[in-house]
Amino acid sequence: MNIHSRLVAFAAAASILGAVPAFAQEEPAHVKPATAYVQQNLQPWLSDPVVIAAVVEANKKHKRLMQEDIIALDKAWVAKDPAVVDPVRKNELSEFLIQKRDASGGVVTEVFVMDNRGLNVGQTDGTSDLWQGDEAKWQKTYGVGPGAIFVDKVEEDGGKKIAQVSAVIVDKDVAIGAVTFGIDVDKLK
């Protein structure tokens, strides 16, 4: 066994035994460019009055919902109940998001905005569920607070390499919701 192999084996054993911290995993190559793109090109329009007003209104509307209410809404969404789907898919915020996605030159493949409960407020494309509050995209952004950005792993979608990048929506230095962008990482190069 060469010296490199011994060091790796020692570090792994020591880490398992708790003697030394595990070596940090190398950050995937898409994380920095995706984060930079969101910070420079997308976050600035999250303070647009259309975004802020829609999230503030949703927060008021959903303030008193109990968990069983959220689950019922989510089930109705999955069943494609127009009374639940249409107010999210056919609103001013969704129109705004579609315009922003279309103006991105194909870099942004989807956008959806969530309120402080993790419920969708507006979106460019349909999501599989209404409630995102049980997922990392909401928990690692809204749950962390202003400035948080979460970059998920790259997944293949229709021949494209897409990473979901999520960020906090802030109003007057307070987190009010979150947003997730689908980013075509090949277009960032």
Image (cartoon, helix red, strand yellow):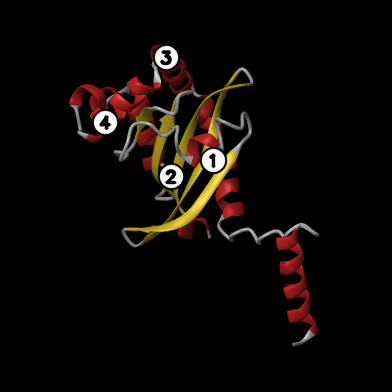
Marks 1 & 2, CB-CB < 8 Å contact? yes
Q: With 120 as the anchor, is 83 left or right in this view?
A: left
Q: Which mark is residue 33?
A: none
Q: Identify the secondary structure beneath mark 1.
A: helix
Label 4: few (<14), some or many (≥20) within 10 Å? some
Q: Identify the secondary structure beneath mark 4.
A: helix
- Residue at image coords 72%, 59%: 22
Q: Amino acid at mark 2?
A: Ser
Q: Foreground residue, 137 or 169?
A: 137
Q: Tell me the distance, in whole angstroms, between the alpha carbons under discs 3 and 1.
A: 25 Å
Determine which residue is flagged by label 1. 41
Q: Amino acid at mark 3?
A: Glu
Determine which residue is flagged by label 3. 57
Mark 3 / mark 2, whichever is N-terminal: 3
Percent across and percent down for residue 114 are 43, 29
Q: With 135 as the anchor, is 20 left or right in this view?
A: right
Determine which residue is flagged by label 4. 75
Percent across and percent down for residue 19 are 80, 59
Which label sits in the foreground, 3 or 2? 3
Q: Residue furthest bottom?
A: 1
Mark 4 / mark 3, whichever is N-terminal: 3
Q: Quarter of the image containing the N terminus?
A: bottom right
- Residue at image coords 54%, 47%: 151
Q: Tell me the distance, in whole angstroms, between the alpha carbons under discs 1 and 2.
A: 9 Å
